[in-house]
Amino acid sequence: MDKKEIAFKILSENGLKYTEPRKILIEFLSEDENKHLTPEEIYDKLNPDYPNLGIATVYRNLQNFENLGIVQRLNLGDGVSRFELAELVEDVHQHHHLVCINCDKLIEVKGDLLGELEEKIENLYDFKIIDHDLKFYGYCGECEEKKDR
């Protein structure tokens, strides 16, 4: 089952109908998993093809999706919330992000590279870790190259 199918199953299991706006949003978010868009950006990209989809509907559904674990909110310290489709598989940690402090480019780091560290923390502090969120801040290749010129 892919993420889109799992998302629709989660909606159904929680008594939420499979509406056209929900379908549009989930399909849009699943098209390119490297999207990290604000609700306004999502609305702006969808509006030409779906003029009846209102900004309030986008916000409301993203909030519902977040509450159900279908989407993940990304806060990068700039006061703006971005959203992406969550992993939707139990016991799989979210991926990590690289944030360019010059151009705001967001790069995904696939895979969980912190397994050994988590195990040490769990043993040392008698604490069961269920997830983590890690962001690295620096310069993307393009900005680093421009900086060196």
Image (tube, grey):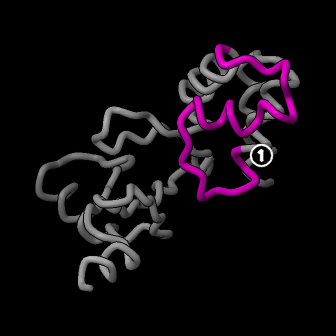
Residue 94, horizontal then vertical, whole percent: 47, 54
Q: Position of residue 131 (x, y in %)?
A: 38, 48
**Residue range (magenta):** 29-56
The residue singled out by tag 1 in the image is 4
In front of the other: 120 or 144: 144
Crowd band around label 1 with a 10 angstrom C-alpha radius: few (<14), some (14–19), many (20+): some
Q: Residue furthest front?
A: 149
Quarter the N terminus occupies: bottom right
Give, as a three-letter code, the residue at label 1: Lys
In the rendered view, would you say 54 is above or below 25? above
Total marks shown come to 1
Name the residue located 23 percent from the left edge and 67 percent from the top edge: 117
Q: Nearer the viewer, residue 49 or 58?
A: 49
Is residue 118 one of those drawn in magenta? no
**Residue 5, horizontal then vertical, whole percent:** 81, 44
Residue 19: percent from left, percent from top: 86, 21
User: Compared to 144, does 38 lie above or below?
Assistant: above
